[in-house]
Image: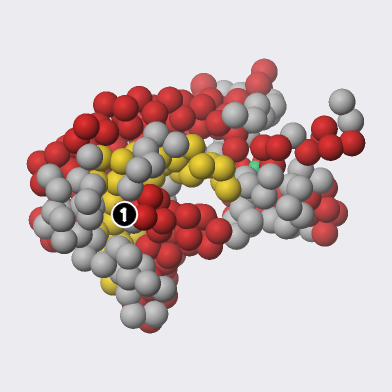
Amino acid sequence: MEQKLKGQTAIVTGASSGIGAGVAKSLASAGATVIVNHPVPATKSAADAVVDEIVCEGGTAISCQCDVSKEDEVKKMFADVVAAHGTVDILVNNAGLQRDAPFTEMTLEQWNYVLSVNLTGQFLCAREAIREFIRRGIVPERSVAAGKIICMSSVHEVIPWGGHANYAASKGGIMLMMKSIAQEFAPKKIRINSICPGAIQTPINRGAWGTPEELKSLLTLIPYDRIGQPEDIGKAAVWLASDESDYITGASIFIDGGMTLYPGFSTNG
Ligand code: BGC
């Protein structure tokens, strides 16, 4: 791959598995030094495996433990990365999880847990990244922008999702947080966008593709008739982090094989 991100440092949160791992590999193959973030000691070996894969392919990466919902840990992660690498050029705000329940049975703990990681975590990381982008300013040899943030949202920032109200609320929140800060910091040449994945084949949604019957049922929601792969998201993340997308900020980019095209209406309505 062309080294579009050469010389830039990227933090990818929640990069020990799933979409985050895919994005970390894509950014590394585009030349970025990638910080593979993971949340707790138990996820270190998975993060290190992603680092090993990147290094075997000739890339540069390092793992870093930090629970993105904890302010002190997020501040420390950014301070450590700046101390070791000089700055941060790209943040991929990816860490996210589901704790699904019918609404009347959803506990406050399930609600708070999902909101604290998916939404508050993105707030804390974006705030530290923007502080660093402003401190450093533009370095023309690396990028015409002072910094780039990619928020991992979901088709569920617009598609309501019964049984997942906490998750859908977190993604709807990401949409307007992203657009509000994109508006606020565009004059500082900081670009902030979201990627909204549909069904990507990762552990978070194994229940939707684990058996042939489940996959068949899932595909009725995807006009393009295939499940997505982490590389589908990784390629878009490289482009959004590069100067090729320099005039794009505040956009929600849906990468979903047409899931948001209301496929049920193709033969009805
Ligand atoms: C969710 C997946 C789901 C997909 C499409 C994603 O945001 O994390 O579990 O399969 O949306 O519904």
Left or right: where 134 falls relative to 214? left
**Which quadrant would residue 100 be assigned to in this image?**
top right
Q: Is residue 203 or residue 178 the one in the foreground?
A: 178
Q: Residue 195 at x, y = what percent? A: 48, 44
Displayed-image quarter of ligand 1: top right
From the viewer's perspective, is residue 251 above or below residue 30?
above
Q: Secondary structure at mark 1?
A: helix
Q: How is the image coloured?
A: secondary structure
Image quadrant where one finds the C terminus: top right
Mark 1 crowd level (few <14, some 14–19, many ≥20, 10 Å Cα): some
Q: Residue 106 at x, y = what percent? A: 61, 24
Q: Is residue 42 or residue 152 the one in the foreground?
A: 152
Q: Is residue 128 visible?
A: no
Left or right: where 184 falls relative to 262? left
From the viewer's perspective, is residue 169 above or below residue 12?
above
Residue type, numbered disc 1? Asp
From the viewer's perspective, is residue 46 above or below residue 197?
below
**Which quadrant would residue 227 be assigned to in this image?**
bottom right
The residue that mark 1 highlights is 243
User: Residue at 63% of width from left, 47% of height from top?
Assistant: 256
User: Residue at 15% of width from left, 55% of height from top?
Assistant: 140
Q: Residue 17 at x, y = what percent? A: 49, 58
